[in-house]
Amino acid sequence: MAAERALLDVQDLRVSFGEGPRARPALDGVSFSVRPGKTLAIVGESGCGKSLTALSIMRLLPTPPARITGGRILFDRGDGPALDLASADRRTMRRLRGKDIAMIFQEPMTALDPVYPIGDQIGEVLVEHEGLSRKDALARAVELLRLVGVPSPEERARQYPHEFSGGMRQRAVIAIALACEPALLIADEPTTALDVTVQAQVLRLMRDIQQRFASSILFITHDMGVVGQMADEVVVMYLGQVVEEGPVSAVLSRPAHPYSQGLIASIPTLDMPRDRVLQPISGMVPPIGSITTGCRFRTRCPHAMEICRRDPPKVTTPAGNSASCWLVEEST
Amino acid sequence: MSWILRRLDAKGILGFAILAVVVLCAVAAPWLSPLDPNAQDLASAIAPPAFGGGTAEHWLGTDRLGQDVLSRIIYGSRVSLVTALAAVAGSALVGTVLGMIAGYFGGFAATVVMRLVDIVLAVPFILLALVFMTVFGPSLLNVIIAFIAARWTQYTRIAYGLVLELREREFIQACVAAGLTTTDILLRHVLVNLAGPLLVVATLELGFVILIESGLSFLGLGTPPEVPSWGGMLQEGRALINVAWWLTTFPGLAIMLTVVGFNFIGDWMRDQFDPRTGSVRPTEIGSRD
Amino acid sequence: MFAFLARRTLEFLVVIFGVLTIVFVLQRFSGDPTNLLLPVDAPQEVRTELRHQLGLDRPLPEQYLRFIGRVAVGDLGDSYRFRQPALGLVLERLPATLLLASASLLISLVLALPLGTLAAVYRNTWIDSLATGISLLGQAMPVYWLGLLGILLFSVQWRLLPSMGGGSFAALVLPATTLAVYSAARIMRLTRAAVLDVLHQDFIRLARAKGLGEGKVLVKHALRNASIPIVTIIGLQFGGLLGGAVITETVFAWPGVGRLAVNAVQQRDFPVVQAVTVVIALAFSLINLAVDVLYARLNPRIRLG
């Protein structure tokens, strides 16, 4: 793994809300890396900081109140040393966004500007980054719509967002993201707001796209079930920290961290015995910044011990996943 | 009461402070004002304020008839407050009832009421007031009637919109299912939910009425000249604008401060009812002049 | 779009009809016009004859129909004082009022749109506080008082601008600016709110994620969307300007319909007040109709719906 150069290497990323003594840490030393052509999934409940991570990479955090307070976000553009997005200037970021790194948002219903035709909104990226004329950009937009599976794209390109269904809008948003063939695609819960049948179609589309463009995807979701279908590797986050990471097969079949175990236990499956009851994780996610030392999960963990008040070590299991947990430390 | 105190911000405190001063002026005018507002003293007519070369006897100077400007301003608060309270109470009552009827029953009632709103709104308010003055003659009472005849639309539009929403909500449906009479539902359950937004509108309207009433008095269509009113003072001061700046400056400041006070309270109340400060609310779009 | 405009046109007609009806009803309250037209000691026969001439001895429904019929051909009655058609008097002075109101609207927009936008973009900074403060005072100052202060400073003190009369550009500056303050304050407040609302939308974040610069995000996406509610309030403010003109014209002796109306009220010259009301209501409603067309143009949901 070390031999291959990562496309995106996030190191010890820290993000805080607010200033001075009232600042609350929202991301607390997050590290992971995305390899070229692979999909990395970040999983966790709402409030774990997965969307903040995505917005940090794009440098689209709502500042103030949120801001990056530490760490590096190294992005490999293929020429020379990797660029640190955490400290890149605004101009560099602007050129990167939409061209090298594109993002798909959770809410397709509100992600598109209601007053412009879909085709114009896709073409806008090409005019901005590729210097295309408006006419050429529009022609290319039609091709992109066709690519993402929108029927009769010539007509559709002239239509407005309110004439599109939710699933079709998300395809349009994906088309915008793909327009400049970005090296990295960040998808923040791209299917959460969609109907179940449409979800499956959009996921299939994203897998096709990845094979076709050989791009990397950072896939953010709260749904462990989707992770198995989409990702090569997975990072489990809880309260602004990574609690477990590793290859999808290892994490899904032998989750080492009690939180990952809890997430997996709450996936409903078809072959599940009738009498088995889904086990939700007990309790609620505590507010950001309320627990700042030791294992953050200890307030909800079924195996919590006295030692959990101290920061747990990161341990790699024989299966290849590493988890930050005292329990894992003991068993290996 | 303590609930209000705990939630006060700078805006709210300032608003209530200004309001308190104005109300105090109106209630305690005989004790607060240094002189009789109608006492004429031609010997010291058009005297400048104390800090502008005048004497300490007339802090804010005197007018053409030697009447004390400060005393007249203190007494003038009465006309403004009484007009505002009467006009707002009347229009709020009429407007809310009509809006609730239109919203709750819908259909023909709604069509008639809301068309009437459109019609009244098609005539700029001041013109409507002028028509009233022509027909019934200029007087303070007719000013109040004109306000009620025009401004009920503000409450009707808000009440109508809110009742339409409420009608679909489960608890109202439950009331219907429970066999409550329509009057009971409207008074005990619907009105309670309208009170907040309507109170905000009413507070902002208080400021608006004071602003426009002074304008009508300025045009000579409100109070008779012997009753001290801020608008009337400005009208008199206008003729002497070349020689006596204080006659126009101070009554205007009184109007402005009072209106700012009501607007502060209105804004503060809006923030209490709607935490999404600054967003476009019906009350924002609704008010119109 | 066609259905929308057809509905709005119909509403427009209902409104105009309603205004006429109200004016008619109030006219019947306004007392016996023969008292104003004839000397106090006029003989009863003359009075009856005049009542007959004016059609006042007819049943009310017939009077109403005749009234509507006359209005339809542009007859709004004769001024009691000037003894000439009231409509003519109003139309003569209408351009001056429209000029004043339009100039004021222009001034409000030039002030309010940039300031409101800046206040939204630089929310919670000193720019925002300054803009909000200005808008607060602007909404609380009586128009005519501001006019008087303007005269005091610019005409009396510094002798820069004329304090009264119409006809010249210089004479327009003071009344138009004074009149503009209130609507500028309101438009600014709404612009700030509308832009702020749009800036929180998801599509603004997507526009940024596309790599567009902040300027393009603001102008092309934020302002374009915020313009939809702003256009509506501008139409409404024009009514406020026409109303405010009544007072402003009096302060500055501006030869418009407002001053005509105020003088007519003092003389209880009902036909003139009636003509001013109908003409202004018509002008205001037409402007709102135009605003609705613009609104529909700006909003694809309605344009295509």
Image: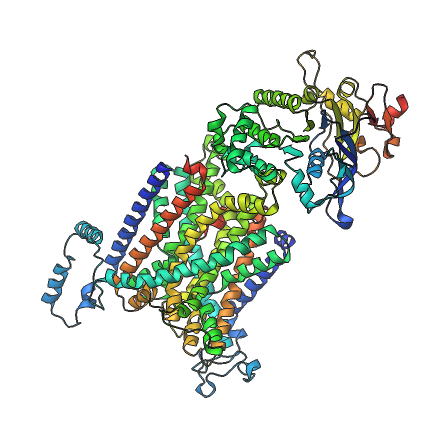
Is the residue A328 above or below the residue B60 in the image? Answer: above
- Left/right placement of residue A39 relative to residue A158 reads right
Is the residue B178 above or below the residue C80 in the image? Answer: above
Which residue is outermost to the left? Answer: C45
Residue closest to the eye, A197 or A112: A112
Residue closest to the eye, A304 or A46: A46
**Residue A93, x across and y down, in percent:** 68, 41
**Residue C211, x across and y down, in percent:** 63, 40
Where is the C terminus of chain C found, in terms of image quarters? top left
Residue B266 in sight in this render? no
Q: Quadrant of residue C148?
A: bottom left
Where is the N terminus of chain C found, in terms of image quarters? top left
Residue closest to the eye, A251 or B185: A251
**Residue C296, x across and y down, in percent:** 41, 41
Residue closest to the eye, B57 or C68: C68
- Left/right placement of residue B146 relative to residue A104 reads left
**Residue C127, x across and y down, in percent:** 61, 57
Name which residue lies at 58% across and 36% down.
A126
Instruction: Specify the color scheme.
Output: rainbow
Q: Quadrant of residue A301?
A: top right
Is the residue B98 above or below the residue A75 in the image? Answer: below
Instruction: Tell how many labels.
Output: 0
Residue B44 in sight in this render? yes
- Left/right placement of residue A280 relative to residue B60 reads right
